[in-house]
Amino acid sequence: MPTQPDAGAGLKRGILVVAVIGVAALLYACSGQGSTPQSYASLAKGGFSKKEDGRGLNVEGAGHPAPATVFVDSTGKIRTLADFKGKPLLVNLWATWCGPCVKEMPTLAALQKKYAGKVEVVALSIDSAKDSDKAKAFIAKNAPLAFYQDTGMKLPFAFDPTAQGYPSTMFYGRDGIERARMVGEADWASPEASAVVDRLLKD
């Protein structure tokens, strides 16, 4: 005679599977992977985008490591974002042909000056090689920002998710993990911008 399935045993197995999945999800969240620090989530709701597209601060890329894509500094030396690991980092993608990028750069320079030695601002030009001199001259007018360039425009597509416009600014903690990002023009000399950077310094 065939054995009838034990409904009770099946229910117990189902409960066990759900429990295991729940514990795994909890451990995943507690490890900081796939979760967003509440402070950044709160800041993202308010944002501080100046105007333009109004997309402001978001946490879509939070939890992802900085891409390993290479770029160059003013001397032509190959660099990666890993070179800056160990201190909070703001990576700003910009170009001389991007009006909002040019407009916000003086305020980004002001922020670097205010947080000198505490936060590193990597203003990374995505201008083509033929416009390198033009980009260098522009950054020279916005001290203390240093010149970095990705002439192949590969880095914008290496972020997770990819950069959704210019300017785009990614915030990284000392561990090289993204905390939040700003899409669109912002006033980096504003109290709102300082609040985000101050939060970054607490991580």
Image (cartoon, rainbow, N blue to C red):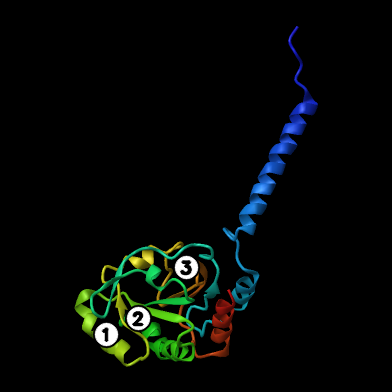
Q: Secondary structure at mark 1?
A: helix
Q: Image point 52% across, 78% down: which residue?
A: 54
Q: Image point 47% across, 68% down: which residue?
A: 176
Q: Label 2 to label 3, Cα distance in Å?
A: 27 Å
Q: Label 1 to label 3, Cα distance in Å?
A: 26 Å
Q: Label 1 to label 2, Cα distance in Å?
A: 15 Å
Task: Give how far across and how far down residue 34 sits, in percent.
Answer: 57, 58
Q: What residue would you read off at disc 3?
A: 176
Q: What residue would you read off at disc 2?
A: 98
Circle nearer the N terminus (2, 3) = 2
- Give the quarter of the image for residue 139: bottom left
Amino acid type at circle 3 is Gly
Outermost residue toward the top? 1
- Of residue 134 and residue 89, the one placed in the foreground of this image is 89
Tell me the quarter of the image containing the N terminus: top right
Q: What residue would you read off at disc 1?
A: 136
- Of residue 130 and residue 194, the one placed in the foreground of this image is 194
- Give the quarter of the image for residue 94: bottom left
Amino acid type at circle 1 is Lys
- Circle 1 packing at 10 Å, graded few (<14), some (14-19), many (20+), is some
Circle nearer the N terminus (1, 2) = 2
- Of residue 98 and residue 39, the one placed in the foreground of this image is 39
Q: How many marks?
A: 3
Amino acid type at circle 2 is Cys
- Circle 3 packing at 10 Å, graded few (<14), some (14-19), many (20+), is many
Task: Give how far across and how far down residue 30 sits, in percent.
Answer: 64, 58
Foreground label between 1 and 3: 3
Outermost residue toward the right? 8
Foreground label between 1 and 2: 1
2 and 3 marks in contact (CB < 8 Å): no
